[in-house]
Image (tube, rainbow, N blue to C red):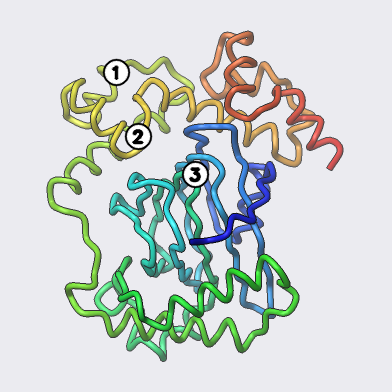
Amino acid sequence: MRESTEVFARHNLFDLCQQLQVCDLQLIVLDGPGPHLDLHQCRVGELSAVTCTMGFRSRASFALPDGWCMLMYVHAVGSDTSWYQGTTLSEGQLLTLLPGMPNEMVLEPGTIVTHLLIRTELLAPYCGGLSRQHLPAIIATTPEHPIHARYRSLDRSLRQAADAVTTQELKAIARAHAEAVAAASPLDKIIASHARRVRYISFRQAEDFARGHMREEIYIKDLCSAAGISPRTLQNVFFEFAGISPNRYLSALRLSAACCSLSAPDGGRRSISSVAMNCGIWDMSRFSAGYRRAFGELPRDTQNHRRAA
């Protein structure tokens, strides 16, 4: 059993993008209080490593900087509803994220992941090429595979003595990861069933519509039309992939967008009411109450944190 040593801290939604060294991060707090997580990181030369334990359910979308790959290891999952690109995540999986591709995921509370950010030119020699043919997105490994011990050791180092992590250690883990993925058999490659992929596409179509029309009044019929599915199916796919109803998702989307705006460097100079309205929120009293439930503080508190920073 893993010893629980996590210390959850509240993180700034806007600044998480820089901490994780990803681009265009969109983070939605699906179930609060958030964004609370236990995060440890180090940067050694051009390499970086992050290990984190989720304290809230998050819906994340991000891209990688040009010329960079992300190697991820799943230590534990909070439930079977954590996923990457619609494919369910489980303990011991290796994920290989390539540049130029969108990355979509949901991580449940209690999920623990470690990831490395490495230049593609350093990774390519170990795996015969950087393509989905050579590097499937997710693979499973046997319990005795040495890659588990390497990532667990890195997780401990990042939590206890991140300054002691060396370039050689990170490069060795990256090489072992790439070689394990390149050597994976077809049975090791984790792919969602056809039926789940169809449901995931419907979820993403409805979700994309919601994001693109966030400032407008959105009705269930609009989401159904965007995804080409019935209201009952819409409810089912949102519970399957977001863990909440479509209406709760819309609320979470708008509240998270408002939080990110208030957390931005110029957030302290913005009017709270204008931020809310730009996110499609018109009732200020309900906004404050919903914001507090989601983030454990009022909108003005988020602004004050930014001003103090």
Task: Give the residue at x 28% y 79%.
Answer: 134
Residue 109: numbered disc:
3
Q: Amino acid at mark 2?
A: Glu
Say which residue label 1 marks.
220
Residue displayed at 67% across by 84% down: 166
The residue most toward the right is 308
Q: Tag 1, which secondary structure?
A: helix
Q: Which of pointers 2 and 3 lies earlier in the amino acid sequence?
A: 3
Q: Cα distance, mark 2 to mark 1?
A: 12 Å
Sequence-first tag of 3 and 1: 3
Left or right of residue 291, residue 107 in this image = left
Q: Answer few, some or many: residues within 10 Å of disc 3's Cα (few below 14, many 20 plus, some between 14 and 19).
A: some
Residue 274 location, x and y as percent? 66, 19
> Is residue 289 toward the left or the right of residue 246 in the image?
right
* Residue annotated with mark 2: 207
Number of other residues with Cα within 10 Å of mark 2, as a class: few under 14, some 14 to 19, many 20 or more: many
Q: Dividing the picture into quarters, in which one does residue 235 lie?
A: top left
94 shown above or below 169: above
Mark 3 vs 1: CB contact within 8 A? no
Tell me the quarter of the picture where residue 132 sits. bottom left
| Left or right: 83 as drawn, with respect to 21 | left
What is the x, y in percent for residue 184?
26, 80
Q: What's the residue at 38%, 48% (across, down)?
A: 82
Q: Separation of disc 3 and disc 1 at Cα?
A: 28 Å
Q: Is residue 144 above or below residue 243?
A: below
Q: Amino acid at mark 1?
A: Ile
Q: Who is closer to the viewer here, 68 or 142?
A: 142
Question: From mark 2 to mark 3, how far is it between C-alphas?
Answer: 22 Å
In the displayed structure, would residue 196 be above or below residue 214? below
